[in-house]
Image (tube, grey):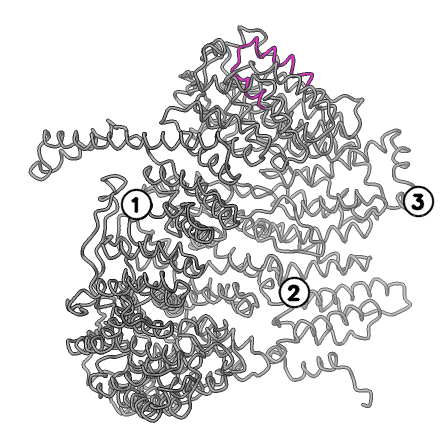
Amino acid sequence: MLLPSRCNTGNAGHLAASSVSPRPFHEKGVTSWENDIISLFCRLALDNLGRVDWTPYISVIFTKFLRNLRLPVGKKRVKLTGEKKSFDIASAAIWPACMLHEDLCLTALEDLFKAVELYFHPSNYGDWTAKLSSMLMKIPQCIVGRVNLERYKKPSWLPAVPVTAHLSDDRIRRFALAMKPILLLNMYSKHIGMRLETLFALKNLAELVPDLIVPELLERLYPALDSLTEPHRLTASMSAVTICMRSLFSIEQGRSHVLPLLMAVLPGIDSNDYRKSTCTFSFLTCLVSMVPLEDCSDSADRTDLSEEERSLCHASAGFEEFALQCFDRCLMYISNSTNDLHGRHDSVSRDINERMTREEKFTRLGMSSLVATIIYQCSDQICASVLQQLYSFVSSRYLSYNHYTGAAVASFCAMAVRLRPAVAEKVIFEPILKLLRDRVRIAAKDLAVNEEMDEEIAWTVKLAAEVLGSSGRIVLNSQRSSLVQCMETLLLTKCSLLYKLVVVLFRSCLRGLLLTFPTNMRSVNSEELDVAPDEFLPIRHWCQSIPQRSLKVEWYVPNDAEVDFAEELIRQFLEPALEILRFHADGSQPLDRKELERTLLLVEMFVAGAAIRFPFDSATVNQILPCETAVKIYSISPDPIICTSEREILIAGRPARQYLFDVIQPVLRKISLDDEDDVKSIKIILRIFRSLMFFRGLENEEVQSRIKGHIVTGKQLGRNLGFRNEQLRLLLFERLAIQHLRRHYDHRGSPLTKLRLAVLMEMIQLATGPYRDIRILGQNYFTDGMNNIRFAYRAFVDEILNKLDQSLGDVEQKAQMKGSLYLILGGRGGSLVNKHDWHTLAKCFPALLKVASDSRTATAIFDKLAERMDRNFSTTMICIHAAEGASRVADEMLNLLDPAVIGSTDERSAQRVVVWNKRLEESAENERLFLSLSHSLIDFVRERITKPKNFHFALFVLSFLVRRDVALSVDLANVFMDNWANTSSDKARALAKHPILSVMRCIKRPIIRTTLNGLDKNVPKESMGAPQAGIRSDNLWLCFDENQLPRNEKEYESTIFVDKAHHGYYGFPESLRVASPVKDQVVAGDMPSSLSSVERAVYDKMMEEAYVEILIRLMSVEDSKQHGKFDQFTYWIFRTLFRHFEDAFLPIFLPHLTRLVSSKDEHQHRCAAEILSGIVRGSKRWPYKKLLHMWDVVTPLLKTALANLSTESLADWGVFAQFANEGDARRNFPLIKIFFELPRTDTSFQSSSRLYVLQSAFFGSFDWRRKELHTKILDLMKDRIEEPYRDRVAWTLSNLFRNEIHLPTTNQSIQQTPRLVDFLTEYYDKIKALLLPPNHLNHLNHLNYLNHLIPGQGEPAMAIFKTLVKMISQTVILSLSFGPPQLQWFLPLLLRFENDSRDEELRNDCLTALACLSQIALSLPEIEEMLTQVETVVGDQTGNVPWRDRVLALGHLQTVVFNNFFTIKSNSDWVQRVHRLAVQNLENESLEVRETASVTLAGLVQCGFISLEKSFLDQFFRKSTTKYRLGEEKSAKALLTRHAGILGLTAYISAFPYSVAIHTPDILVILSGHVNDPQPINQTVSNAIKDFRRTHLDNWSEHKKLFSEDQLERLTDLLVSPTYYA
């Protein structure tokens, strides 16, 4: 995917078009690389819009797209097993959009939409539905992107789209007209994903052509609003109009629909229907957010208004009525919702969200959005009316404070105060505070003594808390002294639940006083629009977009008075509470649990409310970084500034955060010593500590929920078409507000201060405490802190590891150990064992291995640590090496700068020396730590006095310490070799395999390579200058030739073997680097004297007979879970062993291999296959004599193994053959000879098994150099084609012909592979006699008859045919290119024997072959031959073709046409022939053929392949009126013609099952006159009318409008049964 695809030259079109080939689309099956090729072509089309001529390939491309959908066609829907993959859906959408400027592409898209339209009907649902929708629904999005590129893109260095290729408005309208029907069908889908995709497609089309989409949606919405029986239709229509709401204002008279729609959808707010209510909330929110609810009727007399504007002014008088009714319905919805009075009452707002159901969450979200939108969009007069209505509701009743309905209503009041403070102050804020004062005054005495909840007081406190948190300035305007007095009274309550609400009241009041937020949220602002206030008319600016730079925001910034009041509250309430805690900590005035919890809750809420003004600690800690450069790479950013004022709040004259920590820390210590099970208080302290570290007024969850809401709103109200910097004011405002809110919680890269260090230390203590809930909370908060402070882990790693100490008591030890392990595991920020720091790794791993616990928790954590290491552990650098080239380039770049800035060359050189010396010191220290860690782990593993999990984890960690940049340790190699034969642990053996392979790769001898020059000069060229592909005269030396094989030691060791198959196929580079001949390679010295220490360690182990015996016994054990199938790692290990030590181990393994291959046990055969494959592949660079000896001893073993094959071991030997036969076949000829040995004396199973091994050896991957061997395989298959193991013969033949690819540049002078055409031609002549006339098949056994015609050839012909049928199925699936036309020759035979019930296996094979031939893409010659064969079968006049063959042929034709739709339709002659085949067979003598022809004709009309024009229908009309007389000789022919006309008419009816075409009413009237005709006409008419009634029943109220009264009367007589009493 790194290939360049953008071309700026003038010949870009010519160059790109010449490089584009339909070859990637010719495949029968979807190959693994097709997705990448399709994506590459799509990128080529996107990067070169208008520069590539795609016209020659349109039909091929769209045929491939249509087939990729795998839509069912016909009755026999056989799925092809080879076509399970598909290419990317996005690519399928981008490419057509990039070609849309081509007329043929637009026509093809119209045909495609017509062909698949019925598949979108809600009744037609299947596996294909989601994919079909996903692909087509993305096309409008791509077209919008293209229009933006052509019309709205800013000038850049990229080449512009040629003007001639720009999409015109007419072309876009034509596309929209073609796609609109399937969108209007798919919008009613019951699949939520498909419905969403359709909505976004409608939105994109509505932006392109609003006048085509929006009126159609409105026509569907208005009737759905009046219907009571189709809620799904209503919600679907409402959702469609909602997402296209902005386009409503782009059509003529679109604004006139605003008020009627607002009033019409109000009944949708129904507490009995959650889905409808949710859609209604969304609909009203979107519409109101673009329309200011302001009465403009007073401006209707202005002279500068148009008629439309004047009518809108009059209509705007109804906005107040709408707002009042909308609020009334929302409040009624809340009243009707059942309060959860039996739920928990100990919750705050966060717990309310956790208890809400999915329906309740969506209801609250939708209703809150609607209420907020109405409040900020309406005028002051309307706002006062609705807020008065809201206050009447909240004051006349009390809702449950801990139910979502109460929280929703309270949030309505809060939104009113925040969004419209001037209006809400008198209507909402002051009345609610007065209500609070009055109720608190009345209940003051009871509050101080009663522990029961007062629901009325709780509801009032909830309301007050919400409104106080929205605007603090109003508090100053009100009687704040009375508010403080109420707070004092409420704090005296004995009810714990009410106390929690009271402290939330403090938090809300402080947030309202100190938060900064934007205020003017309304959708229009006259200042931004440059309109004078006296000329401003809101109706002119409905759905008004503004540039981003024009946005003017008003901010609510707390003034000094508000900060003073906040400090007053802190002095009056917080400081006394802190003094109480101080006295409790020193023991002078201890508190009981309840009082302590209440006091801590008050402190927590004060911190949560005032933290925005609490300064952060500025005293940073000197962190020890992994290296000095980490400071520059990972910069530490300061904490964000979120308000313009620099005034910070202090407590007792000290920094608030530090003061609070100094007070709370002793309290925590006292609780830990005296009352450690006070979990509630410790949890509160943990939350306070977390707030002291980073909290600035808002939680992350609050901001994230608002971000998600903004994303949803942006998808609904945003505009994809046009300039991106112009959007609705609401979207720009919300984006700015969210950006401001993110400053409250984004602390990534914050410095590690002394306060944070102390807090995190306390959290470590709590995270390793005895109580589970506290541990979990402490661990979560600690990992959050680690994620925000870079490299902070180094300050805490020692403390965490010390917690793994085993010297504590049993209970404390387990809890501390669990907490420490979880801290080491870490969270999203990463685990300590994955840090790029050898100091930390050298501490962590030894400490972890000392954990001796067998608990499930410890085991699970060790497994998770191993999983994270396996996924995320990177090879951290140990030694830093100087790169001279990089230094030189850096100097050259620096020399371009001013020396006064960067210093002189000498200064830079001196500085470089200093820096480099520091790097060398760091490297030396890293190496010391690495070696120390390695030795400690090795010692630990060798002792084996530990728990299994620790042992396995140590072995796992050691596998990461095998490195090339550090000298390999002998002890490390010994550890892995010992554990490879570990008799007590399967897991240890599995863990040792990978590192052993790594060790062998580290000690691998270098391969000597040679350079071949001048090979490219002999490559023949095509006329266009491209090299010829395939076998040529210049690359014959690479091809296998048995006569040219090396015969002696001199020839073999001087031969250059080329293992890579891609060399030479397309040509040669100027210099080809290949491995030198064997004689030039590094020779293994005398063993063991010449071996290094590591090599000697491996050698000694493998030379121990006892070790090898144990190893083979473990590898071949029957119940080994590690050895369920052929293990590639084991094969790789043995390959590296025998490659490095050559034949040194062969005498040790030979007796074992002899025993293994002589056995029938599958596990022993698997072990032998793994070892023998390693021996064969490892010997490719052995000297000739050693190689010859190896084949002398291995050949008998392989022959014995192949003779003892079983069903279970067959797959393992197939993998052996694939691996062993890789590379240059000239080297593997002894093995190839063994594979070709197929004795005639073998049983069928043995022969089939040998063929499987042969097939695996040659067709696992294609090697063009083995043409001679492929020809030999073909000859062998021809010799065995009549054998009973035809399945294996067919598979081998299909794999043999699979890679017969004819590229445009293929060398035609030399045959590249065996040709399928020659094979089919040869054997078709041998089996064509099977196509016997039906009269012979009815009276004689077909084989006896064949033997009578051709003595001795009947049974062989049938055996060959059975093999060929299986081969055809596999060939068309596996082939990478179009098949030859000769495949279609077998079509009549397949049709004939698919109906033969005497051989069920042959019948099923023929069915599969027909399905394959009908569902593949056909080339032009194949289509021509297919039509010829179908015409031969269907149009036969001799009577030699049974009617069943004709029926199957017509069904086959329909499927082929659909799967090759665009290719066949591009040829008018083929269209006429298909049409003629369907129409002519309407008059066939066989009733079954006639009915099938009618179905075929209907299908062809249905998909748009042919259109029944009025002239064709007139022919059917005339035939249907053919007169007949029963009893006369000519009556049968006349009746046949009459029936043909009726079948043609019913085909037209069936072609439109869910709609009423233009001629349908007339045809139904004509059919009604044939109800009493003789059989089979009357039955045909009856069935057609019944089907019409069934498919049109759902939408009959709309369809009957297309009939006249007379036609309806006639149709009613047919559809409605007469009454018995009539």
Residue 1532: x, y in percent? Answer: 86, 63
* Numbered range of the magenta stretch: 1174-1197
The residues tagged by marks 2 and 3 sit, at their Cα atoms, a distance apart of 41 Å
Q: CA distance from mark 1 to mark 2?
A: 74 Å
The residue sitting at the front extreme is 588
Q: Which element is circle 1 on? A: helix
Q: Residue 1047 placed where, x, y %?
A: 59, 8
Residue matched to label 2: 1551
SS of the residue under disc 3: helix
Say left or right for 707 vs 1263: left
Mark positioned earlier in the residue sequence (2 or 3): 3
Query: Label 1 is placed on what type of residue?
Result: Arg
Residue lying at the far left of the rendered structure: 900
Residue 1138 vs residue 288: left or right?
A: right
> Badges 2 and 3: C-beta atoms under 8 Å apart?
no
User: How would you rate the neighbour count of disc 1 (Cα within 10 Å): few for under 14, some for 14-19, many for 20 or more?
Assistant: some
* Mark 2: secondary structure: loop
Distance from disc 3 to disc 1, alpha carbons, whole Å, reads: 94 Å
Any magenta on residue 1183?
yes
Answer yes or no: is residue 292 visible. Answer: no
Task: Please tell me the numbered disc located at residue 1339.
Answer: 3
Q: Is residue 786 visible?
A: yes
Nearer the N terminus, badge 1 or badge 2?
Answer: 1
